Image (cartoon, rainbow, N blue to C red):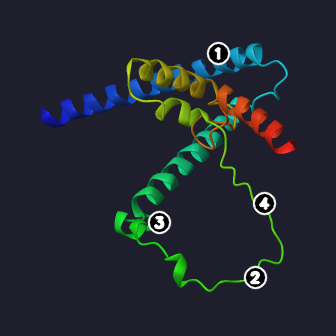
Amino acid sequence: YRDRRSLVMSSLELLAWALLILVLLRALVSLEQIYSLLRPDAPSPPPLSGVPRVLLRKAALTLKGAVYLVLSRDKVSSSALRRTIDPAELEPSRVTREVRLIFVRHGESVWNLVFNRGFGPSFLWRLLSTLLHELLLVPVDDSAFLDSPLSPLGLQQCGQLAIFTTN
Protein backbone atom coordinates (compact mmCIF):
# COMPACT_ATOMS: atom_id res chain seq x y z
CA TYR A 1 0.00 0.00 0.00
CA ARG A 2 2.81 2.37 0.88
CA ASP A 3 4.70 1.75 -2.39
CA ARG A 4 1.51 2.24 -4.37
CA ARG A 5 0.85 5.53 -2.56
CA SER A 6 4.38 6.81 -3.27
CA LEU A 7 3.96 5.77 -6.91
CA VAL A 8 0.70 7.73 -7.10
CA MET A 9 2.37 10.69 -5.40
CA SER A 10 5.25 10.49 -7.86
CA SER A 11 2.79 10.45 -10.77
CA LEU A 12 0.96 13.46 -9.32
CA GLU A 13 4.23 15.27 -8.77
CA LEU A 14 5.30 14.51 -12.33
CA LEU A 15 1.99 15.82 -13.63
CA ALA A 16 2.32 18.96 -11.48
CA TRP A 17 5.84 19.59 -12.82
CA ALA A 18 4.65 19.10 -16.40
CA LEU A 19 1.78 21.56 -15.85
CA LEU A 20 4.16 24.05 -14.25
CA ILE A 21 6.50 23.85 -17.24
CA LEU A 22 3.60 24.36 -19.64
CA VAL A 23 2.39 27.39 -17.66
CA LEU A 24 5.92 28.84 -17.62
CA LEU A 25 6.29 28.32 -21.37
CA ARG A 26 2.96 30.06 -21.94
CA ALA A 27 4.07 32.91 -19.67
CA LEU A 28 7.33 33.23 -21.62
CA VAL A 29 5.41 33.54 -24.88
CA SER A 30 3.26 36.27 -23.31
CA LEU A 31 6.33 38.01 -21.91
CA GLU A 32 7.96 37.95 -25.33
CA GLN A 33 4.90 39.71 -26.78
CA ILE A 34 4.87 42.26 -23.92
CA TYR A 35 8.60 42.87 -24.32
CA SER A 36 8.21 43.59 -28.04
CA LEU A 37 5.41 46.06 -27.23
CA LEU A 38 7.45 47.81 -24.53
CA ARG A 39 10.66 47.98 -26.53
CA PRO A 40 9.83 47.98 -30.25
CA ASP A 41 13.31 49.30 -31.08
CA ALA A 42 15.07 46.48 -29.21
CA PRO A 43 16.35 43.46 -31.10
CA SER A 44 13.90 40.62 -31.13
CA PRO A 45 14.41 38.08 -28.35
CA PRO A 46 15.77 34.67 -29.20
CA PRO A 47 13.26 32.00 -30.16
CA LEU A 48 11.57 30.12 -27.37
CA SER A 49 13.90 27.20 -28.02
CA GLY A 50 16.82 29.44 -26.96
CA VAL A 51 15.33 30.26 -23.55
CA PRO A 52 16.75 27.17 -21.79
CA ARG A 53 20.26 28.17 -22.93
CA VAL A 54 19.75 31.68 -21.58
CA LEU A 55 18.37 30.34 -18.28
CA LEU A 56 21.29 27.91 -17.93
CA ARG A 57 23.75 30.74 -18.59
CA LYS A 58 22.09 32.94 -15.97
CA ALA A 59 22.00 30.07 -13.46
CA ALA A 60 25.67 29.27 -14.12
CA LEU A 61 26.66 32.91 -13.63
CA THR A 62 24.66 33.11 -10.41
CA LEU A 63 26.21 29.90 -9.10
CA LYS A 64 29.71 31.03 -10.07
CA GLY A 65 29.18 34.34 -8.27
CA ALA A 66 27.85 32.63 -5.13
CA VAL A 67 30.77 30.19 -5.05
CA TYR A 68 33.25 33.03 -5.52
CA LEU A 69 31.58 35.05 -2.76
CA VAL A 70 31.86 32.14 -0.32
CA LEU A 71 35.33 30.89 -1.27
CA SER A 72 37.01 34.19 -2.13
CA ARG A 73 40.14 35.14 -0.23
CA ASP A 74 39.85 38.76 -1.32
CA LYS A 75 38.45 39.75 2.04
CA VAL A 76 40.42 42.40 3.94
CA SER A 77 40.40 42.39 7.73
CA SER A 78 39.92 45.56 9.73
CA SER A 79 43.41 45.14 11.22
CA ALA A 80 44.90 45.06 7.72
CA LEU A 81 43.03 48.24 6.89
CA ARG A 82 44.44 49.96 10.01
CA ARG A 83 48.01 49.16 8.96
CA THR A 84 49.16 52.05 6.82
CA ILE A 85 52.50 53.13 5.50
CA ASP A 86 54.14 55.99 7.38
CA PRO A 87 54.94 58.75 4.87
CA ALA A 88 58.19 59.44 6.76
CA GLU A 89 59.42 55.96 5.79
CA LEU A 90 59.13 56.73 2.09
CA GLU A 91 62.12 58.11 0.22
CA PRO A 92 61.55 61.61 -1.01
CA SER A 93 61.69 61.71 -4.77
CA ARG A 94 61.86 64.48 -7.27
CA VAL A 95 58.70 65.27 -9.10
CA THR A 96 59.51 65.50 -12.76
CA ARG A 97 56.01 65.56 -14.13
CA GLU A 98 52.61 66.06 -12.62
CA VAL A 99 49.71 63.90 -13.74
CA ARG A 100 46.11 64.26 -12.71
CA LEU A 101 44.31 60.94 -12.22
CA ILE A 102 40.57 60.75 -11.75
CA PHE A 103 39.28 57.43 -10.45
CA VAL A 104 35.69 56.72 -11.40
CA ARG A 105 33.83 53.66 -10.20
CA HIS A 106 30.43 53.75 -11.82
CA GLY A 107 27.10 55.41 -11.48
CA GLU A 108 24.29 53.89 -9.47
CA SER A 109 23.31 50.51 -10.90
CA VAL A 110 19.94 48.78 -10.66
CA TRP A 111 21.50 46.49 -8.03
CA ASN A 112 22.49 49.56 -5.97
CA LEU A 113 19.03 51.01 -6.45
CA VAL A 114 17.40 47.89 -5.02
CA PHE A 115 19.78 46.88 -2.23
CA ASN A 116 21.78 49.97 -1.21
CA ARG A 117 19.02 52.45 -0.50
CA GLY A 118 18.01 50.82 2.77
CA PHE A 119 15.46 48.23 3.74
CA GLY A 120 12.61 50.53 4.68
CA PRO A 121 9.07 50.44 3.30
CA SER A 122 10.17 51.23 -0.26
CA PHE A 123 12.55 48.23 -0.39
CA LEU A 124 9.77 45.74 -1.10
CA TRP A 125 8.48 47.88 -3.99
CA ARG A 126 11.99 48.29 -5.46
CA LEU A 127 12.65 44.57 -5.15
CA LEU A 128 9.31 43.47 -6.64
CA SER A 129 9.48 45.92 -9.56
CA THR A 130 13.04 44.80 -10.37
CA LEU A 131 12.05 41.13 -10.10
CA LEU A 132 9.20 41.83 -12.54
CA HIS A 133 11.67 43.53 -14.86
CA GLU A 134 13.97 40.50 -14.51
CA LEU A 135 11.02 38.27 -15.42
CA LEU A 136 10.53 40.31 -18.59
CA LEU A 137 14.20 39.75 -19.40
CA VAL A 138 14.01 35.95 -19.04
CA PRO A 139 13.70 35.24 -22.77
CA VAL A 140 16.56 37.60 -23.66
CA ASP A 141 20.21 37.39 -22.77
CA ASP A 142 20.03 40.36 -20.39
CA SER A 143 19.50 40.79 -16.66
CA ALA A 144 18.73 43.43 -14.07
CA PHE A 145 20.87 41.64 -11.48
CA LEU A 146 23.70 39.97 -13.40
CA ASP A 147 25.96 42.64 -14.87
CA SER A 148 23.45 45.15 -13.59
CA PRO A 149 22.77 48.13 -15.87
CA LEU A 150 22.76 51.71 -14.67
CA SER A 151 19.63 53.04 -13.01
CA PRO A 152 18.11 56.35 -14.18
CA LEU A 153 20.09 58.08 -11.42
CA GLY A 154 23.26 56.28 -12.59
CA LEU A 155 22.71 57.56 -16.13
CA GLN A 156 22.24 61.08 -14.74
CA GLN A 157 25.47 60.71 -12.72
CA CYS A 158 27.34 59.68 -15.89
CA GLY A 159 26.04 62.78 -17.66
CA GLN A 160 27.19 64.96 -14.77
CA LEU A 161 30.61 63.26 -14.83
CA ALA A 162 30.95 63.92 -18.54
CA ILE A 163 30.28 67.62 -17.92
CA PHE A 164 32.73 67.67 -14.98
CA THR A 165 35.57 66.02 -16.89
CA THR A 166 35.23 68.33 -19.92
CA ASN A 167 35.56 71.45 -17.73
Mark 3 secondary-structure assignment: loop
What is the CA distance from the residue labelled 1 to the residue labelled 4? 52 Å
98 sits to left or right of 123: right
The residue drawn where x is 75% and y is 29% is 45
The reply to whether dot 1 and dot 4 touch (C-beta < 8 Å) is no
Quadrant of res 82: bottom left
Which numbered disc flags the more N-terminal residue, 1 or 3?
1
The residue drawn where x is 64% and y is 43% is 53
Residue 30, labelled with which disc? 1
Closer-to-camera residue (3/153): 153
The residue drawn where x is 65% and y is 35% is 51
* Front of the two marks 1 and 2: 2
Image: 4 above or below 80:
above
What is the CA distance from the residue labelled 1 to the residue labelled 3? 43 Å
* Front of the two marks 2 and 4: 2
Where residue 108 appears, as percent x and y from the top left, is 62, 36
Residue 42, labelled with which disc? none
Image: 122 above or below 143:
above
Residue 100, labelled with which disc? 4
What is the CA distance from the residue labelled 1 to the residue labelled 2? 67 Å
Amino acid of disc 4: Arg
What is the CA distance from the residue labelled 2 to the residue labelled 4? 17 Å
